[in-house]
Amino acid sequence: MANKLKAAAIAAASLFVGTAASAEDIELNVETLADGLTHPWGMAFMPDGNILVSERAGGLRVYTPGEGLGERLKNVPDVAAVNQGGMLDVAVDPDFASNNTIYFCYSKPGDGGSSSSVTKATLKDGEIADAKTIFTAAPLVNNGFHFGCRLAFDSEGYLFVTLGDRYKYMDEAQNTDNHFGKIVRIHADGSVPESNPFTDGGAPEVYSYGHRNVQGITVHPQTKAVWAMEHGPKGGDEVNLLEAGANYGWPEITYGIDYNGDIISDKTEMQGMKRPVLYWDPSIAPSGMTFYYGEPFKAWEGDLLVGSLKFTHLRRVEMEGDTPKDQHEYLRNRSERIRDVEVGPDGFIYLLTDAPNGKLLKVSPAN
């Protein structure tokens, strides 16, 4: 089903990007490729054009162009599908064409609670095989919040895994001896790169720290820099350019307040802590991010695309190098929570909507 929707430009919400967006008139075509997904969370394109999609309740499915959505894959491990937990992001190996290897990040149940964990497996004939857990965040805790769990391979083949502070443990985001509020970097087999910044500590996988709940990560196609995006509390969602060993401040510095109105910190900067490239106040609840490069939306080349759960739209942030400029929102009148955003090999934009009857959408210019 296709609908022609008109994009509405909005004033930039970031205090770092104070310029107002210019009026824009562009018609988009939105095609529903699949529905009936149970809270879809992440997707990854395979070399043959098929799309691996996760469902938070615990499913992994493959969408095949021209054929539709396949049955749930067999032999998927149990997940702790409680509150925000479940089967979350997915990724395919850089050498998938030769090894059929996939990765998925999920809330893995264990003694005393659950933990953000990454499993590596082989995909074949409608099932997964040779599943092996290659990373488990420590320690396990008994709540269902702030798992992070976005995955991305960088240009050197390192696997980045985003994590959350598990809500009640926000102060631990400043402690590099655990995995609360961190982004970790590992090899594809789960081993720790020797060049990681905290290899002498209790959590040698840690690459950066001081994060809250990282719901987006992407590698810039040209510069190869790694970017991440996290939920703030009430206000203060952030986009950050990652550096090894850097401290991104949570909860010592923040642009947000607690949900009950309490002040978490009255500081937005502190020596030795990185300030975000971009933040949103009020929060948009961002999820999924990617830089656009491709032909159908040539005028958007280099811009950042993010999904908004709270305000139900696709957001485009114009970028001048590493500097954000005007922002625009699209598809808001569909009232669908955007959970993930990817640019396909065909240059079109693919979205997942977070709902009990979630959808896989394809967005193209109307012309």
Image: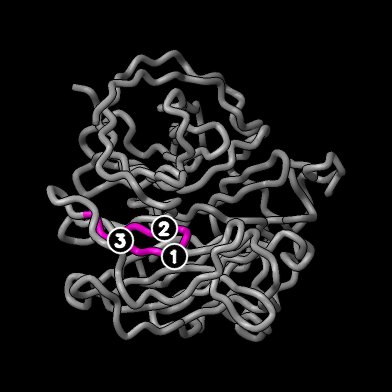
Q: Are marks 2 and 1 in contact (CB under 8 Å)?
A: yes
Q: Is residue 1 left or right of residue 340?
A: left
According to the picture, the residue beneath numbered tag 3 turns out to be: 61
Q: Quadrant of residue 144?
A: bottom right
Q: Which residues are magenta?
A: 53-63
Classify mark 1: helix, strand or loop. Answer: loop
Q: Which mark is residue 112?
A: none
Relative depth, front residue between 330 and 360 = 360
- Type of amino acid at the residue the image marks with label 2: Glu
- Asked whether the viewer can see residue 356, the reply is yes
Mark before the other along the chain sequence, 2 or 3: 2
The percent coordinates of residue 23 (x first, y second) are 44, 13
Residue bearing the label numbered 1? 58
Residue at mark 2 to residue at mark 3: CA–CA distance: 8 Å
Q: Residue 80: percent from the left, percent from the top?
A: 55, 69
- Who's the residue at 59% across and 36% down the image? 284
Query: Which residue is rendered at x = 79% and y = 63% of the image?
Result: 171
Instruction: Identify the amino acid type marked 1.
Output: Gly
Q: Secondary structure at mark 2?
A: strand
Contact (Cβ within 8 Å) of mark 2 with mark 3: yes
Q: Tag on residue 55?
A: 2
